[in-house]
Amino acid sequence: EMGFTALELPMTQPAVSPTLRDEVRGSGLEVSLCAALGAGRDLSSFDADVRAATMQYLTDCLQTGAALGAVVLAGPLYAGGGKRHTLPPAEAAREWELAVTGLQELSRRAKECGIRLALEPLNRYRTSVINTVEQMLPLLADIGCGNVGIHYDTYHACLEEANLLASLETALKSGRVTHFHACANNRGAPGDGIVPWDAVMQLLKQYGY
């Protein structure tokens, strides 16, 4: 009634109650899910048990999404937050490959649920794996799955991108922007702060998001 057309659920728990499920499905709103990937949830962990538990959590989220009629599962699905480290080249390459193979498998499961994956670059205080659009594009190329795209968040971009509008245009030109969070540079609601919202919205419209 307020004019919203979509609803996003934060998946702190991978399941929802039947009551909430029915309410969401009956609302007529488009549904997206945002994964909660804190410490201990990491598809690129060197610990096989952590990877397995994370895959199970994300699979449960996908199954919940299918029950809700969700279209997107978004977030830093490649590694999660809370991972901030510097690795020797060989270990960094292994971490990257674990992210790629994990997301390839998650992509297959997402396709079965009719859900697209949207990978979010996070600021350096949240992760050391992917911080910018330019770092994300090679990951998408290595994954090579059409149902995996970019989750662009203006808050994180304010912290990491040298030029917010240029990075957004790079992402949009790639044709891989699957999800977008409009958030002020201080994590507040859009409108205040330093984000040039008119130019941001113009770019989104120009590239048909």
Image: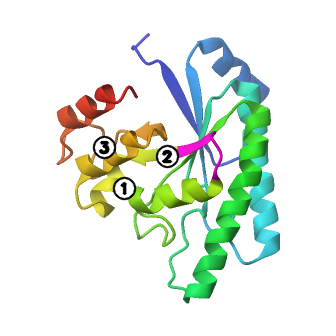
Is disc 2 placed on a helix, strand or loop?
strand
Q: Which residue is mark 1?
A: 156
Residue 206 in sight from this viewpoint: yes
Which amino acid is tagged 2?
A: Ile
Q: Quadrant of the C terminus?
A: top left
Is disc 1 placed on a helix, strand or loop?
helix
Q: Nearer the viewer, mark 3 or mark 1?
A: 3
Please name whichever residue, 80 or 36, is drawn nearer the observer in this view of the structure.
80
Question: Which residue is rendered at x = 82% and y = 71% of the image?
Answer: 49
The extreme bottom residue here reads 88
Q: Position of residue 96 (x, y in %)?
A: 61, 70
- Earlier in the chain: of badge 2 and badge 3, it is 2
Residues drawn in magenta: 144-149
Q: Which residue is mark 3?
A: 169
- Mark on residue 6? none
Please name whichever residue, 50 or 43, is drawn nearer the observer in this view of the structure.
43
Residue 187 in sight from this viewpoint: no
- Mark on residue 150? 2
Q: Residues within 10 Å of mark 2 (few under 14, many from 20)?
A: many
Q: Residues within 10 Å of mark 1 (few under 14, many from 20)?
A: many
Between the residue at mark 3 and the residue at mark 1, the CA separation in whole angstroms equals 16 Å
Instruction: Decide: is 65 above or below 160.
Output: above
Horizontal placement of 197 versus 17: left or right? left
Which amino acid is tagged 1?
A: His
Which amino acid is tagged 3?
A: Glu
Q: Nearer the viewer, mark 2 or mark 1?
A: 2
Question: Which residue is rendered at x = 81% and y = 54% of the image?
Answer: 56
The extreme top residue here reads 1
Horizontal placement of 104 versus 209: left or right? right
Q: Position of residue 58 (x, y in %)?
A: 73, 50
